[in-house]
């Protein structure tokens, strides 16, 4: 999803910069000194700038991913660390420019100038080392975020465990569902897609099952899961909520209806409520009736989803 290069430590950055400068050869001591300083400055400037640009622009980031990254590593901490890298880059450029200016003087002590410039640059890089360490840790976490197309029409399938969420997702999706790991649930989000052909055009509908978050009331969720709900609020265009009136899922109708009302309060989006397992219950509610076992009502549900989204 986000292509962020590995973030080197202060020691690794300095070894790389000074190592490259060490390879410079010239009989002219002034030229050699200037080239060494320029090389160190350019490598550090380019590397730190690359790090800053590689992280997403939080002002333009979709709120779903913004909330995820904030939950995972903290957006404010990221901004602070990235600003520190930018500060260091500018500071190093000024130190290098001052060193080059001194090296151009007729009576310049080149060895002393190199030592002073390298020393001051090293101090700056070591000063931002905690930020480099944090950004590498953040990179490792952010790279685990799987791709969700935030621009595609998205359906979340919700309901208590064992009501048939996974079965419905498989019936509705043209592709085998993929398990996408997220920070707020060890079970992950399960993502599938339906491709709709309209004449010469193809449109994709994204379907997401969110186990571990939307399958129990708020009082049973931990703090991280509650924050995860905040992220999920930005994703769906439609929720399909499944009721099991046969209660083979192990949950009473009262509990299931309570969860339904809670999700209606939490998500200000369109919702379709379906009663699954009607082949067992015989159909006990006024909701749309389906059976993932027999296929009853599945095509009607598909049409209703398309009608609501497209």
Image: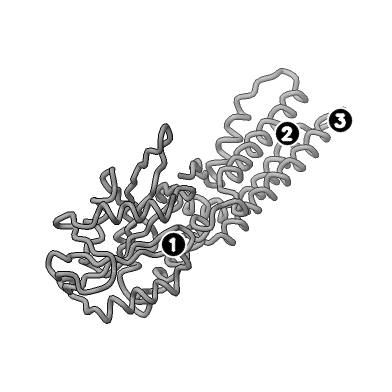
Q: Position of residue 92 (x, y in %)?
A: 71, 43
The residue positioned 32% from the left and 49% from the top of the image is 192
**141 lies left or right of 19:** left
In the rendered structure, are the residues bearing label 3 and label 2 in contact, judged by CB atoms less than 8 Å apart?
no
Q: Position of residue 173 (x, y in %)?
A: 29, 48
Upstream in sequence: badge 3 or badge 2: 3
For numbered disc 1, what is the local secondary structure? helix
Please identify the quadrant where the N terminus is shown: top left
Q: Tell which tag, 3 or 2, sits nearer the viewer.
A: 3
Q: Position of residue 123 (x, y in %)?
A: 66, 50
Q: Tell which tag, 3 or 1, sits nearer the viewer.
A: 1
Residue 181 visible somewhere in the drawing: no
Label 3 – label 2 distance at C-alpha: 14 Å
The residue positioned 40% from the left and 53% from the top of the image is 307
Total tally of numbered discs in the picture: 3
Residue denoted by label 3:
105
Mark 2 is surrounded, within 10 Å at the Cα level, by few (under 14), some (14 to 19) or many (20 or more) other residues, namely few
Mark 3 is surrounded, within 10 Å at the Cα level, by few (under 14), some (14 to 19) or many (20 or more) other residues, namely few
Residue denoted by label 2:
111
The circle on residue 232 is 1
For numbered disc 2, what is the local secondary structure? helix
């Amino acid at each position: 999803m986000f292509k962020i290069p590995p973030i080197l430590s202060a020691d690794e950055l300095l070894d790389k910069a000074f190592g490259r400068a060490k390879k410079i050869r010239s009989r002219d001591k002034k030229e050699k000194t200037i080239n060494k300083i320029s090389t160190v400055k350019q490598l550090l400037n380019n590397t730190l700038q690359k790090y800053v640009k590689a992280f997403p622009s939080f002002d333009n980031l979709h709120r779903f991913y913004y909330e995820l990254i904030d939950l995972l590593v903290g957006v404010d901490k990221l901004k602070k660390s990235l600003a520190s890298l930018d500060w260091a880059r500018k500071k190093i450029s000024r130190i290098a420019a001052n060193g080059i200016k001194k090296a151009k003087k007729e009576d310049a002590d080149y060895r002393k100038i190199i030592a002073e410039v390298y020393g001051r640059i090293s101090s700056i890089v070591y000063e931002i080392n905690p930020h480099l360490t944090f950004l590498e840790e953040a990179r490792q976490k952010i790279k685990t975020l799987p791709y969700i197309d935030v621009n595609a029409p998205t359906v979340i399938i919700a309901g208590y465990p064992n009501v048939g969420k996974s079965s419905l997702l498989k019936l509705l999706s043209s592709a085998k569902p993929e398990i996408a790991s997220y920070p707020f649930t060890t079970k992950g989000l399960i993502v599938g897609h339906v491709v709709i052909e309209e004449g010469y055009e193809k449109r994709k509908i994204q379907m997401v099952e969110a186990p571990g978050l939307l399958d129990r009331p708020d009082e049973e969720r931990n703090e991280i899961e509650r924050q995860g709900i905040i992220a999920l609020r930005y994703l769906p265009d439609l929720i399909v909520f499944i009721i099991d009136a046969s209660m083979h899922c192990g949950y009473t109708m009262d509990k299931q209806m309570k969860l339904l009302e809670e999700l209606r309060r939490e998500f200000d989006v369109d919702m379709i409520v379906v009663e699954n397992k009607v082949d067992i219950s015989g159909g006990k509610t006024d909701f749309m009736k389906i059976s993932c076992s027999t296929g009853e009502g599945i095509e009607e549900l598909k049409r209703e989803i398309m009608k609501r989204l497209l």
